[in-house]
Amino acid sequence: MINLFNTHIETLSVHRVGNKSRNEAYFLSDSKYGLNDEIMPLLKEFFFKSFREKEENYYQFAHDVDLDYNEMYKFASEVFENPDRAHEISKNITKHLFEQSNHPHIKNGEVYVTYLTNLSIDNNVVDAIGVFKSELQSDFLQFEEKDSNLEMILQQGINLNKLDKGCIIFNYKKEEGYKILTVDSNRYDARYWLEHFLSVDAFQDENFITKKYLKFCQDFAKDVVLPAEDKKEEVMFMNRAVNHFAKNDEFVEQNFLNEVIDNPDLMSEFKNYKVDKGEKYSIEDVTTFPIANAAVSDARKKIKNVINLDTNIQIKLDFINPESAEKFVEKGWDEEKQMYYYLVYFNKEQKS
């Protein structure tokens, strides 16, 4: 988990990068930007808003041979070792970005390289480097008094409500390639930012593994439990799975299977499914790991607990009290109507 509330922008360097394939140049500022109290809060909101609103999926710098061959890893390490050189190194970062800007779809824009202090990640206070890029400009109106009338002047500029691209490189977990958050609002050139400029892989910590294992369970429920049982059992399987994660700090696969799978036939199906599909979710060899509570909460919000019937009726099952669905909802077959039915027991209707 991160907290950017108390983050301070120590230095800011602003450059411009063009599209190399269109013979556009780059522009490097001689000196760092002079920050003031008026622009500081606006820039903080511009830079950080997208990260507060986005699910925390962490990355790390990677290279097939050695991390030291990753350009951005090298630049980040140089800045963290000597923050006074942040502006000079920001020029190298901008030139590196320019070298990757060789696809016709990539837009030119301003590059902001910041040295940040007082960030909180995983309950650790650390420094960080922010690299942000604005690409799309918006029309806006300025007004000017001219004689006895107001004249409208159409201009273009950066919309501070939306960051186009950005990353925050935390001075944390250096040996693994630093922990990194990134956003990209414009998906027409996704590989350019993540793969070519940053060269990152997913950071495989407990948050990553928890999300992947729960996603694996969700697909197992859809692909195996639903065809073998019914929609109610698919929903209840995921209900039990999420609740197991929620009440434990450490995941132990055998304990999970014993608690969550109540049909013995599905036990072997689960193990076979993991052998076939585990690599896709990066969990093929995973049997124990620390559980990330934030990842469990995110997963719970996304999992559907509704049975949709073709008679335009919905049955919503309670994830907080799963025993209610187990005890008070029954499925059957009506011979006369030749239709399935759900029988729901209750004492009285609750007021809305």
Image (cartoon, grey):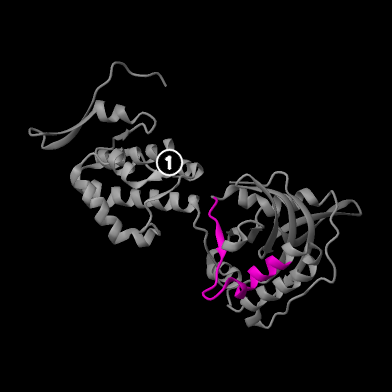
Q: Residue 340, relative to residue 43: is it above or below?
A: above
Percent coordinates x, y for residue 316 in the rendering: 34, 33
For the view shown, which residue lies furthest in the left direction?
336
Q: Magenta stretch: residue 91 in it?
A: no
In the rendered image, which quarter is residue 286 located in? Answer: bottom left
Q: How many marks?
A: 1
Q: In the image, what residue type sits under mark 1?
A: Arg
In the rendered image, which quarter is residue 324 located in? Answer: top left
253, 272: nearer the viewer: 253
Q: Which contiguous range is marked in magenta?
A: 56-78
Q: Is residue 89 left or right of residue 107?
A: right
Q: Residue 295, relative to residue 350: is it above or below?
A: below
Q: Identify the residue at image location x=59%, y=62%.
A: 175
Q: Identify the residue at image location x=74%, y=60%.
A: 114
Q: Is residue 309 visible?
A: no
In the rendered image, which quarter is residue 327 located in? Answer: top left
Residue matched to label 1: 300
For the view shown, which residue lies furthest in the top direction?
348
Quadrant containing the C terminus is top left
Q: Is residue 140 left or right of residue 232?
A: right
